[in-house]
Image: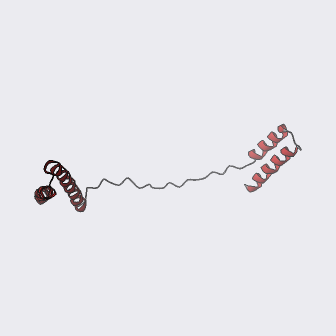
Amino acid sequence: MTAILNDLRELDARLSRGEITDVEYTAQRAALIDSIDVVDTDFVEVDTPSARPEQKLSGSMTWGFGIVLCLGIIGVCLCFAMLIFGDMNLALTLGVTILAALTVALFRSLEE
């Protein structure tokens, strides 16, 4: 293969030096390219892995989602309580109470 590439480069150089005409260049280039033996390749069939089946959420992911959900709800409750009451202690008490109620509800749903 490299011999043919060298021949093509030499042919290009001869054309640029003016030793051959465009018609001769085209004919000699076509002859070089036609002289290349085409090698048949056998492609090996490869088994591709199938798509992974969908997995259910594990217990720790369910717990994590529950905790994030509870923290989000307590944050919203704290914001509303601060807007309504303007007292940080009252807002925290209300938020912790709601969080405790949600935690109890979460534990009851996990028992079933």
Q: Where residue 75 appears, x then y in whole percent?
A: 20, 54
Above/below status of 23 relative to 68: above
Depth order, front residue of 106/2: 106
**Residue 74 at what x, y percent from top left?**
18, 55
Q: Residue at x 84, y 44 (%)?
A: 15
The residue drawn where x is 77% and y is 55% is 3
Q: Nearer the viewer, residue 108 or 103?
A: 103
Q: Nearer the viewer, residue 23 or 60?
A: 60
> Which residue is depicted at the point 55% across and 53% down?
43
Q: Is residue 71 left or right of residue 28?
A: left
The outermost residue toward the bottom is: 60
Is residue 40 in sight in this rendering?
yes
Residue 111 % position (x, y): 11, 60
Percent across and percent down for residue 81 are: 15, 51
Q: Quadrant of the N terminus?
A: bottom right
Extreme front residue here? 86
Furthest-right residue in this view: 19
From the viewer's perspective, is 35 left or right of 59? right
